Image (spheres, rainbow, N blue to C red):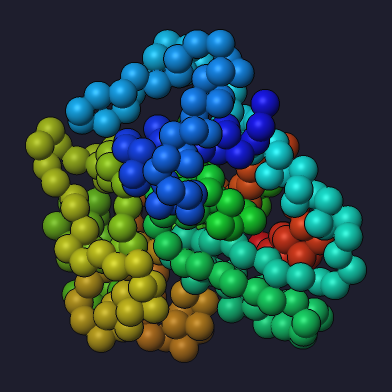
Amino acid sequence: MNLKRLEHLVAVVEEGTLAAAARRVNLTQPALTRSIQALEDEAGMALLDRGARGVTLTSTGRMVLERARRILFEASCLERDLQLVQQHEMGVVRFGLGPFPAAILLSRVLRIMQRDWPNLRVNAEVNSSEALFAALQSEQLDFVLTANRLMPLTVELEVRPLMPEPIGFFARPLHPLCAGPVELAQIREARLASVPLPVSVHELWRTMLRCRPGEDVATRVESTDFRALTQLACHEDVVLIAPNRALEDELVSGELVQLQIEDMQDLKVQYSIAYLAQRTLSPAAEKAIATIEAVG
């Protein structure tokens, strides 16, 4: 079957109308209609039902759509792999990180890569796990670095784990909680600050902090800008939840201290590098991953 026709079918289904799909694939609507009709002629039956409100897949169309997406993905991978074989320069690497791993690793990783491979073009995006995995699936990113707990189960991934990172609660030395040992109840009542966390992680915090039924431990301040949260904790009476390594400079300078919490178990988070399964990484991406693994 013609790959372009399969691409046209996917576009029609995803856009919902022939007019929108035609704009997406840069064809006139009559030309797109002829392409779909040719595909249906090849299949020997209708793949789409046309109606006043748009188009819908027939049962055969759903089967063809599923196969078409796999075929197009494999064709994209083959084209990309051939390009990698032909390339002799370092090329480009695009990767994404969650706010916490970015705070721990990104600065050092970028310095090393700029020192060792100055001709390599690097695009590092810091964003939520949902946005990063959406970009990974659409092949806008080569790989992502995020917590294992945040990885989607619906995407087939290759995963390379890093060393677990200890997590703690931090505050400025003048914070009232720094006067002595801290009880879990005091943490539950504190003004907590953190990067945005999914519901599953909030539930984990509730369990670890031994919340009573109905008791809320929602963070008062959330931001994907971890450095802004760090400055907030250095100057205001908030308690920052963060990996220890993300605050090395502030702990050494004394701007922040780690709270000693009674009856609190040691907390760790597992971060991993993830990329699409059965997708060959570029030499540039492999170098970036090797750097992250060395730093991590």
Q: Is residue 179 visible?
A: no
State the count of labels.
0
Residue at image coords 17%, 63%: 220
The image quadrant of residue 18 is top left
Residue 276 can be seen in this image:
yes
Q: Which residue is outermost to the left?
A: 214
Q: Which residue lies at the image location 51% right of the left edge and 67% below the top edge?
A: 125
Residue depicted at x 72% and y 65%: 288
Front-most of 158 and 89? 89
> Measured from the top left, where is residue 243 in percent x and y?
47, 62
Q: Quadrant of the N terminus?
A: top right
Q: Nearer the viewer, residue 10 or 97?
A: 10
Left or right: 190 with respect to 67? left
Q: Is residue 286 above or below residue 70?
A: below
Q: Nearer the viewer, residue 205 or 67?
A: 67
Residue 101 pos. (x, y %) = 52, 63
Q: Is residue 104 left or right of residue 159?
A: left
Q: Identify which residue, 108 or 27, lies in the foreground.
A: 27
Q: Position of residue 257 (x, y in %)?
A: 38, 75
Q: Is residue 126 above or below residue 1?
A: below
Q: Quadrant of the C terminus?
A: bottom right
Q: Quadrant of residue 128?
A: bottom left
